[in-house]
Amino acid sequence: MGIVGEPMGTFTPLAPRARTLFHLQAFSRLVLFWGPLCFVAGAVGAYLWDPLAAVSTAFALLFVRFLVALWWPWLTWRRWGWRCEDDELLIQRGVLLRSVTAIPIERVQHVDVRQGPLEQWLGLARVHVHTASGLGADGVVPGLERVVAETLRDQLVAGAARGDDGV
């Protein structure tokens, strides 16, 4: 069972290539953030403390982060799901802290389909749904095939146009 009594099967999963996207993002964080951080921590620890213990600890931390970069993106991909109904868009996500966001379609102001460089390369897109709150996107569905993202956008805009408060 999913959250709030919803079976996970009722939500549309993200595209399979979204796993690749999530893994590439995780490994880029590993290389660009965690690698240098562990190097600096190991160097400072070696200077101030026992060199062997400091370098060993830095490598152990980097190895753990490597394992997380292998495992966490798959879990993230597995836990994302979305469903567009006549009156609302439901977005389910979260590995440890799971949540379902319900966005009433009549409250939708505008919908963006965006692609970063990795998403373009993989043929994926993400949908940003904005409502009247004005504080950025109220809902984001990443890792959709470009055609699916455009179809979802068109469906949300058409539904909002039928409502009183939308687009």
Image (tube, grey):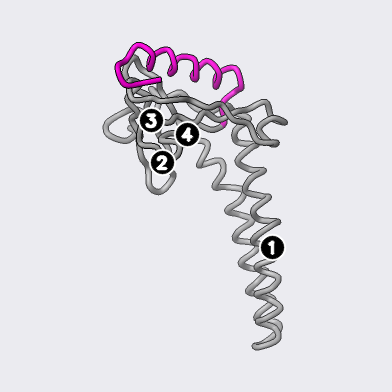
Give the number of the mark in front: 4 or 3.
3
SS assignment for the magenta stretch, majority? helix
Q: Secondary structure at mark 3?
A: strand
Q: Which mark is residue 131?
A: 3
Q: Position of residue 43 (x, y in %)?
A: 71, 78
| Image location of residue 101, percent across then percent down | 35, 34
- Whichever of labels 3 and 1 marks the residue nearer the N terminus, that label is 1
Of the two numbered discs 2 and 4 in the rendering, the one whose residue sits closer to the viewer: 2
- The amino acid pointed to by label 1 is Gly
> Which residue sits at x=42%, y=12%?
158
Q: Is residue 145 above or below residue 161?
A: below
> What's the mark number on residue 159?
none
Q: CA distance from mark 2 to mark 3?
A: 9 Å
Q: Secondary structure at mark 4?
A: strand
Amino acid of disc 4: Val
Q: Which residue bears the numbered disc 2?
A: 135
Mark 4 lies on residue:
140
Which residue is identified by label 1? Answer: 35
